[in-house]
Image: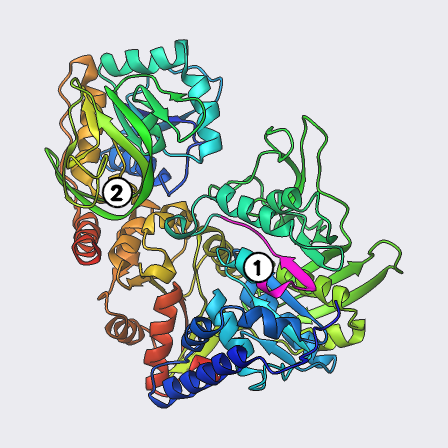
Amino acid sequence: MKLTIGWLYPSKMNIYGDRGNVLALAQRARWRGLDAEIAPIGLGDPVPREVDVFFFGGGQDQEQVSVSRDLQGPKGQAVKDAVEGGAAMLAVCGGYQLLGHEYRPHDGEPLLGIGLFDLVTVAGRERFIGNVVVDTDFGPLVGFENHSGLTHLGPNARPLGRVRVGRGNNGRDGTEGARHRNAVGCYLHGSLLPKNPRLTDWLIASGLGRRGDGVDLPPLNDAMEQAAHAAAMERAVRTR
Amino acid sequence: MAPRPATRPDLRLGAALVAAKVTGVAIRRLGRGGGTAAPGLVADRIDPDLLGKIAGRLPRGAIVVAGTNGKTTVARMVADVLEAAGLAVAHNRSGSNMVRGVASALAERSSLGGDPLADAGVIEGDEAALPEIVRQVQPRVLLLNNLFRDQLDRYGELATVANRWRAALTSLGSDTVVVVNADDPTLAAITGRISARRLCFGLDESDPRLRLPSLPHAVDATVCGRCGHDLAYDALYSAHLGAWRCPACGNARPRLDVVGREIVLDGVEALRLAVDVSPPAETARRLDLAIAVPGLYNAYNAVAAVAAATAFGVPDDVVIAALGRFRSAFGRIERVVYRDRTLVMALVKNPVGFNEMLRMLTTATDGLTVPTLIAINDLFADGRDVSWLWDVDFELLADGTAPLFTSGIRGPDMANRLKYAGVASERIRPLPTDLATGLDAFVDALPAGETSYLLPTYTAMLELRRVLAARGAVEAFWRQ
């Protein structure tokens, strides 16, 4: 069996070490004897039909403008259709914001998203920077937030979890991230997936399982992942 | 620039200087470290213009050195060259490079009346503090070495730093020389239209072993500053540095006034290179340099230092001799003998610097063959976000044989990074996060008489040095 990872805009949206998420997906598939292929999806490229898991990272402001434009029309629709068809997705920070309806800057035109998640992000005055712990269905997730956008979930959005340490979507309502079908969006860098392997395995299993066959991923020795998770948890509690 | 004469006593400045000097002496007497920033903090409360006042009285003016990587090394090279040329130099040599650290260093080298006890200033400036340092100091020479992704939690995006630098450059007049690494497309772009005189340096190296086959992962500045198209490279040397051009609009690396070529690297020890100097309206000449610092990144640093020396008019033979005697700054790369083992310690602080270090350590021996301790902290000065470890190409280590030890506050993250890089799990040896304990466990695992590498982040390096100094293996850094 092969896992195909569709990496949206790897050269434009790749700050904060988000490549680690793609590495985690690929390596954890390979360690189970699966093939893993990373399919880069750049500006103007079509969305391959065989993608099992998408990854969409964060970018610098100027890059997000061209990415937003590229996603309007058929390409954004193709991503949405893939997720509605069961493909898994992890989107972080800028990618997460562009999966909502729009991003409203302090001045200038809103940056349009694709509305996969029912949420809107508004430029804030304060930057949320620091270690984060979020309680989720995947257990406590650890990561590092660094954003000034305030994300407000609409009535049809489900949060990824509740912030135990940190500021989360908007610093007010205690939520962090969003979920829709097998798609997860959030503000957690770190990289997120290498030290939260339960979420990683859920993305792999649900992406591969979208055709209806059950996928059973045998357990791995996660001692190093758990040690990194514990260190991040301890830093979050101590530093915020 | 003509020095501003001290016509009448400046009481506020005098009081600030007395306070700064007393604070510096007190901190060292109390054994609270080097006292590198606190005197500046105290002085700043009394006279916020202290830095500008002292710098303005330096008879030969000041050079400010900035860049993500290499600024401490370049500043020390320039200081050594100016001293070899017979100048007394005031220099924030300890690497304390925020506004207050700079003010502390200049206050220490001035009379209580505020007259500098030096001819020239060499000021290493932090990227975030650079605009304020430039505003106060009004340097004779501003050297911009490179601009890489670094500590996003602290500095913000690369474009943000570049825009702040661009704004700072507009305040400089034609009596300032901006010495710029033109191999860096971002720096070439922000110095394209300035009133100051621009002196461009870079590399023109034909040895294919010193070129990269493609852009590494951890780069940002690869689009044309004029039209936004992706840049192409006729030669790529490190990160996004090289002979770049825009296939769409014809924008390209500007003509180089100071060029490094014929680089020969000698492992983790030294390098040789030729530097051709040919500024407009000057006779072209060549300097053959042999320097006891390793790696391609230090070839860039040496070319930068030669360009700065050119801007100060230092004779070539003085430059060649001074760089020939150069020794690197604390922790940058140094040898320590401890418990009968030789530890080669080299600072790692961001993806580009770490990649260059890995490149140097693995190409010298065709893969990493030496046991190595990587010590990762996540304090403010290291960057609190360890995501940057995922931008470093640790995949380079997957093929080697040497064991890789990890320690520091985020040592467990480092061990996990190595696992995902494909390093065999039996080669990954997580040690206790406490560095004193971790260091001893590492040394215990090494055969006596062997050499090994220590790769710490900034505060991990300070802590390892503190431990080694307490045990008599190295000198305290502020004495160097």
* Furthest residue toward top: A74
- Dividing the picture into quadrants, the one containing residue B380 is bottom left
Query: Is B402 left, or right, of B258 in this rendering?
Result: left
Question: Residue at point 60% right, 72% down?
Answer: B53
The crowding category of the residue bearing disc 1, from other C-alpha atoms within 10 Å (few below 14, some 14 to 19, many at least 20), is: many
Name the amino acid type tagged 2: Pro
Query: Which segment is the magenta one?
Result: B134-148
Q: Residue at x 80, y 59 (%)?
A: B277
Quadrant where the N terminus of chain A is found in the figure? top left
**Residue on which disc 2 sits:** A194
Of the residues tagged 2 and 1, which is closer to the observer? 1
Q: Position of residue A71 (x, y in %)?
A: 41, 17
Q: Position of residue B9 (x, y in %)?
A: 60, 83
Q: Residue at x 37, y 38 (%)?
A: A19
Residue B158 against residue B466 in the figure, above or below = above
Quarter of the figure that contains the C terminus of chain A: bottom left
Say whether mark 1 and mark 2 are on the same chain: no
Circle 1 residue: B66
Which secondary structure lies at badge 2? helix
Q: Quadrant of residue B193?
A: top right
Identify the colour scheme used.
rainbow
Residue nearest the viewer, comparing B406 with B378? B378
Task: Report whether residue A6 is seen.
Answer: no
